[in-house]
Image (cartoon, rainbow, N blue to C red):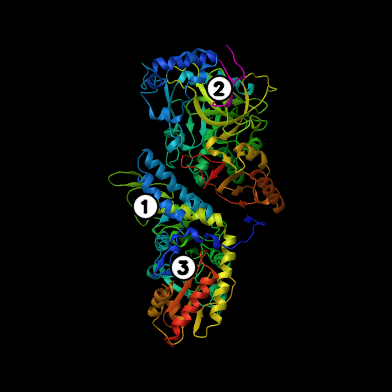
Amino acid sequence: MSICEDKKLEGLDSIRGDFPVLAREVDGRTVNYLDSAATTLKPQSVIDAVTRYYTEFTANIHRGRHRLSEEASDRYEEARYKVALLTNSASNEVIFVRNTTEAINLANHCIGLTKDDFVVCCLDNHHSHFLPWLRHGNVVLVEQTEEMQPDLEHFAELLKLKPKVVALTHCSNVTGNYIPLDVMSKMAHEAGALVVVDAAQSAAHRKLNFSESYIDFLAISSHKMLGPSGIGCLIGKADLLRDGEPMLVGGGVVDYVTADSYQYRKLPHKYEAGTPAIEASYGFGAAIDYLESIGFDRIEAHEKQLSKAFIESINNKPNLACLGQMSLENRAPIFSLYVKGVSDLSDICRALSDSYGVMCRNGHLCAQPLVDHYAGGQVIRMSAYIYNTVDEIEAALEALNSVVQSYV
Amino acid sequence: MELHSLKYEQDERLMRCFGNLDKAKSEVEFAHKKVRYFKDSLNLNNEFSNSAGLNSVPISDKSVYRKNFPAGILSEGSSLKDPYVSRLQSSGTSGERLVSVIHSFKLAERMANCLSINPAFQYLSKVPRIKTCRYAAPNCSDVECANPRSTMQDRILADGTLVLPVYHDLLTTPDSMLRMAFDELHSYEPDLWYVDPMHLSILIKKAKSEGWAFDLDRKFSVLLTYTFATRALLRQISELCAGHAPVASVMAMSEFGFVGLGCEHGNLHLNDKDYFLEFIQMEGTHPDDNLWELVITSIGDRLCPHIRYQTNDIYHLHGACDCGNSMPRVSFLGRSKDLLRLPSGKYITPGSLDEVVGAPKWIDIYQLTEQEVGAYIFRFTGNKDCFSDAEKSQLRQKLQALLETENVRVDDVNYFPFERGGKFQLIRKS
């Protein structure tokens, strides 16, 4: 809990200069980057931190006692401390993995499911938070309300099945909607289920509080938080991680090995086999510093302005329909649109990019059950973040509207 | 020649010295004659023979002793194979790391002279073999105290000190290891608890929450070292030990062993019998700021003399103490790397921060992080039932005044990171 009562909720226009990609021109046009739900842009401080690993250290970590290795290890662990402080967890609960997908697969592995185990999933789960459960467990889906929120009454009914796992997505990568995470994780916990949360889309937008939640495993990715790709985290309750079995074994995970046995190292190292993405951890640490220096209160305020711009612009364009709530409440500035009567949106996205400099995504967004259910085919997703402006959003939607005119 | 509070200037900075200058100069001459590094680097000219000539000797630092270990900094004829040579490792990694060697008799002599500062601890000088339990950062010892599978026998050092089990990142130590530490602290029956105040406070808190009762009837003493002992930590330790066991802060360094001790009035005195102490005014400060950096020259160290050794420790100097001890009375403010310098030029030390924070019942541990110049996060943990938003706001206002900025966030958290070497930084920079 933070007190910042005097802090002004200033606009973030001044930070655009921190992101080198925004200075790039493509065919003489500036870049209007609206694909942050796929990956965020990186500020210069993150790029510098990654480079610093190669220019100053380049040594492996946790191997040997030489000076470069110790310094490299210090900075690697410093990144872990920063994740812990950011998410209000403890450092030994933070396992570095490659990305959210690996984090969820690791949680799945730690829990150890059989096909007799029920797993409650939501329709808006990303494939990375759906397929691992589908492969190993008996998945049941929570119905959605008209507002595309999980139906809590149906959720309560499903909990009577005594599921082993409840797999929740904090913020949908398709609709941008937040679920009532505190309520649902508490209900799941009280029903005796383990709560696994995909926070890939929310971690860069809202302050997470792992230790004071009912969440057992939380998955995040650096590249969606201004950091480098190649590193993410599974944050898990220490007791569960201690009892769990690593997905990979090899160098770095053991204290002692004989010809026929071995002893795991303590947390978190027993889960981090082999040489990790050291340089990415430095960048991840710098990204967290960057986020902390802005503050989540300012980020949320800025995003509200961006979402308002989306909603107002979409409402003026009858050819465009939005998948999800057109409300400012409980949402990130992620909007998935479909064009009535147009099923393949690839050309439209290409035109947005090449004719207008608007970088956004089309497809099923790795959430095909949801997108097929509501849109019946592809969607175009525009997702904004701290470096975007209201003008960019208005321009992007005008561009989309203009391109669409040729298809309807 | 006893020279108390000799004043002179070094690089236009004021300096105050305590101790026996003649003995310090003899130490320099010995090092120049017998120790390869000093033989090669010192030029003892006429200036050195003058009364304040120690000032002409260059200041040495950790890197000198690290780069020249072992052959360059050991005196001729000495050997690391000598069974009386103790090897001490600093808890630091990277630029802070260092292996030091001290003769056991010298260590004992320094300890005895420091213990003489506080009458409550003097009995220890007469204990033939002090049984000590150490509870501190794991890197300080070579035993596997961070390994949850290690046994008590694995963790007993050559001098009989039992190192209690703990993780580097203290607050992630599992309950089973805390229980092990608690049990061993009793079963080993130590005369002395030689502890990091942070570690002891965590054990006290755990014992309280689990209903584990400390046996306070046995005679023992508590020496606090390693981490800056904040008022909040002292409050928690005092709640356990007051009326049962004497508690004092000891200033110790892996390079020297004991350097100073808190007296019965709780004031720190530094040992000017075994060391020549030079306090150099911190760069960019006014003498009225009373910020001094300690430089130490060992006295009579025939194994590995330290010559004008920069400790990077910052102190306030005070006048005479009511306890009557003539050793200089100081307050430890923190390490120079832990200091913040505000845009106005003002230094913020762990000591000055602690003065502002104080010891309210709702703060057990705290840490200040400088996100960037002029932007700070103050994180604390403590009894959540004991504070109000008004109290937090008041503290925030005090911190804003201290840090000369409005941009101070106050967060109530459950976890604090410790350095990989196991130390805790009261002030850290992102």
Residue on which the image places disc 2: B277
Same chain letter for marks 1 and 2 = no
Determine if the magenta segment contains residue B10. yes
Q: Which amino acid lies under the numbered mark 3 shown in the image of this protein?
A: Ala
Say which of B232 and B97 sits in front. Answer: B97
Sequence-first disc among 3 and 1: 3
- Relative to B56, residue A323 above or below: below
State the SS at label 3: loop
Q: Quadrant of the C terminus of chain A?
A: bottom left
Residue on which the image places disc 3: A37
Quick check: can you spot residue B324? yes
Same chain letter for marks 3 and 1 = yes
The chain under label 3 reads A
Say which of A352 and A122 sits in front. Answer: A352
Q: Is residue A9 left or right of residue A168?
A: right
x 62%, y 61%: residue: A9
Percent across and percent down for residue B312 are 52, 31
Q: Are marks 1 and 2 in contact (CB under 8 Å)?
A: no
Q: Quadrant of the N terminus of chain A?
A: bottom right
Q: Is residue B2 left or right of residue A356?
A: right
Determine if the magenta segment contains residue B170. no
Percent across and percent down for residue A29 are 43, 70
> Whole-Å distance between the Cαs marked 2 and 3?
60 Å
- Write the start and end of the magenta stretch as one range: B1-20
> Whole-Å distance between the Cαs marked 3 and 1?
24 Å
Total marks in image? 3
Quick check: can you spot residue B127? no
Say which of B250 and A241 sits in front. Answer: B250
Of tags 1 and 2, the one toward the viewer is: 2
Of tags 3 and 1, the one toward the viewer is: 3
Percent across and percent down for residue A180 are 57, 69
Residue on which the image places disc 1: A276
